[in-house]
Amino acid sequence: MTVDTQKRLAALRAKMREAGVDLVALGPGSHMQWAAGFHPHADERPCLLLIGPEREAFLMPALNAEGSREETAIAFHSWDDAVGPDAALAAALADVGAAQAGHVVLDETMRADFALLLLGALPGVRHSFTDSTIGALRMRKDAAEFATLKMNAGIADRAIQAAFAAARPGMTELELADAIKAHFTSEGASPQFWIVGGGGNGAFPHHQTGGRRLEEGDAVVVDIGGRKAGFPSDITRMVAIGRPPEGYGQIHTIVEKAVQAALKAAKPGVMAKEVDAAARKVIADAGYGEYFVHRTGHGMGIDGHEPPYITATSETVLEEGMVFSIEPGIYIPGRFGIRLEEIVILREDGPEILSTLPRDLHVVRV
């Protein structure tokens, strides 16, 4: 996806002025990807995108300079292993007008040694992380980002359908995961994760897919995601191998009602914790509160998990354009788990679901 770097940097500088920030420093990763449209290979050599009040520049290892120059016109201050990064960093800070910065925002995902190198070059500087600047901007997706997320959601829908078609008694969780991964690959997407939890394994929300064989009577959690064009997908649906276990239908209905309650609560201006509370109340009122053991959702964009987080304590005010999951669950130890997950983009009048698949239980005939 093509990124309008100058437009994004202008928006970032507006946020910097609002927050009284003199410098934003980004390491190779998703923040740099958002701002510059690429990031160089991340290794132990210090590499930073420095964004000052009016200018921006890279501290760039010489080994990365030639390849990175093909991706950006932003100025480089390169350094090599024989000399080290200190002089280049000082020059880059001067170039962007931040040699005397009073408040620097650090990319919370950068290596600690990169952060310490920068802070050492700015003695006495106050530092914070990105939530009020680039983090706030990344939470609201533009039309191109939404289109790419929607495309990925369609691939994930079809990967779930491939799982439905492949599921059968006697196959292992890993074999079902192989069918899912093969589908992602067939559409040019990179498989990112595959949670396949049959029977009692489904009661572990982040079960490590393994060699357990699926048996008649199993309820199976299928939580999967892939990545294409720089963006991910994430979806969870349920499969039963033959007749579902006793009590399954009642609990599936409760989880479905929790999804619907969260969808109804999710509107611009509402705090994230209110959406979590709406889902949690349905499950608690039905007597299963202790079995809902995780948050209701997480944001999604360049990263599969990013702000906003839909938790019981989050006071993030939801805004139009935010993308996040709604995925309540109930997990009965030793028996089964049920999680139903949608990724939504928040519109003016409420959430738009990216998936087109129903959340009904898929039953494999045996």
Image (cartoon, helix red, strand yellow):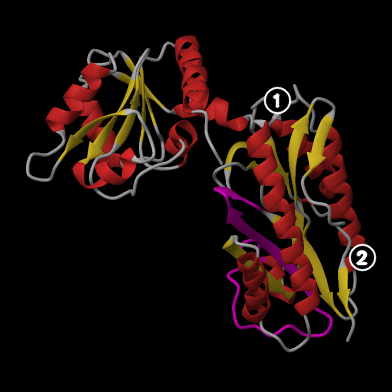
- What x and y, as percent, mark residue 117? 21, 33
Q: Residues within 10 Å of mark 1 (few under 14, many from 20)?
A: many
Q: Which residues are magenta?
A: 204-233
Q: Residue at x 61, y 58 (%)?
A: 226
Apparent side of residue 257 relative to residue 201 in the rendered image (left or right): right
Q: Which residue is mark 2?
A: 249
Question: Which three-letter amino acid code belongs to the residue tagged 1?
Answer: Glu
Magenta run includes residue 209 = yes
Question: Which three-letter amino acid code belongs to the residue tagged 2?
Answer: Gly
Q: Which residue is mark 1?
A: 319
Q: Residue at x 81, y 54 (%)?
A: 288
Q: In this rendered view, identify the residue nearer to me: 36 or 140.
A: 36
Q: Report which quarter residue 303 is drawn in.
A: top right
Instruction: Kindly tell me whether residue 196 is visible in this rendering.
Output: yes
What element does badge 1 sit on? loop
Q: Residue at x 51, y 24 (%)?
A: 8
